[in-house]
Each structure stands twice: as C-alpha cells, then as structure tokens.
Amino acid sequence: MEGIDPGARPSGTGCAECEAANPPGWWFHLRRCAHCGHVGCCDSSPMQHATAHFQETGHRFVRSFEPGEEWFWDYREEALHENGPALAAPEHHPLEQTAPGPSDRVPEDWTERLNA
C-alpha cells in the first residue's frame, strides 16, 4: 500500500509526545504511523497525538500498537483496513504496559478525561 513503509521501526513503546511532555502525559491506546513508525496516542486519549501527527505530516495510515490488534486506519479515506503488510518489530507495546498507561501516570478519574 502506498504510504506504508514495512521497515519503519516504532519510535518507542509509548506516545512520543506524551513521553516528552513536562510532566509526562498518559494515553488510553496507542497508534503507530505505518509510514515512519511514530507512536502516538489514540483519539480517545486526552491529547490525540496520532491524529496530530497525520495532520502535521500527511502520513495517512496508522496501525494499532495494542497487543492482539493488527488493523490499519486510513485518515485520508476515513476507512478501517482489517489487514495490511507486516511491519517491523515490535508489533505492539510491551505486554506489561497497561492500557491506559503508563499505570503510574493514569489519573483516578481517567474515564472522565477520555474524548468521546
């Protein structure tokens, strides 16, 4: 698929912008840019960094970075693709990493802070 680089490795194990914030943020679920490997937080997360990455770069495809999920989302077409090419490892965040996460940063009222 045009716009997907199977060799691009994930930028990290968590949302790049949430990790770099001061203080560091938290996320609900993670998405991985299929073009460059940038890992950002989903649209339900408070900061929605995966969508912001698409808006800044035009990289149209993300893949879930959650264990057991292999779907792709096409921002341009607003379409879900149940499968696509294999991407460079790792395929998801570490199994011990919670969702939402990281566990030590998730506020007690996290469900009230999610975007609908």
Image: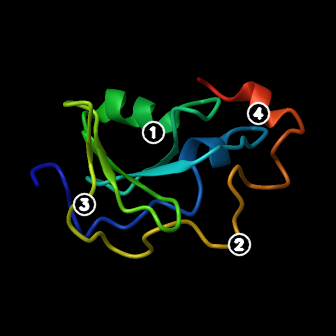
Residue type marked 1:
Ala
Label ID, residue 50: 1
Mark 2 or mark 4: which comes first in sequence?
2
Amino acid on which disc 3 is placed: Asn
Q: Mark 4 points at which residue?
A: 111
Q: Which of marks 4 and 1 is nearer the N terminus?
A: 1
Indicate the quadrant where residue 5 lies: bottom left
* Cα–Cα span, label 3 and label 1: 19 Å
Residue at x 58%, y 33% (from the top left corner): 44
Tell which residue pokes out farthest to the bottom in this image: 89
Instruction: Answer with left or right where residue 96 lies relative to residue 40.
Output: right
Q: Where is residue 43 in the image (x, y as percent from the top left)?
A: 51, 32
Residue to which mark 2 is pinned: 96
Q: Distance between the residues labelled 1 and 2?
A: 22 Å
Horizontal and vertical percent for residue 56? Answer: 34, 29
Q: In percent of the image, x 65 and y 48: which residue is there?
A: 19
| N-terminal label among 3 and 2 | 3
Q: Do the residues labelled 3 and 2 touch (CB within 8 Å)?
A: no
Crowding at label 1, few (<14), some or many (≥20) Cα neighbours within 10 Å? many
Q: Which residue is drawn at 63% across and 73% down?
A: 95
Q: In which quarter of the image is residue 89?
A: bottom left
Image position, residue 45 (x, y; %): 61, 35
Question: Which is more toward the observer, 67 or 61?
Answer: 67
Earlier-in-chain disc, 3 versus 4: 3
Observer-side mark, 3 or 1, equals 3
Figure coloring: rainbow
Q: Quick one: quadrant of the C terminus?
A: top right
Give the alpha-carbon distance from disc 3 to disc 2, as whole Å: 25 Å
The kind of secondary structure element at disc 2 is loop
Label 4 Cα crowd, 10 Å radius (few <14 / some 14-19 / many 20+)? few
Mark 3 lies on residue: 83
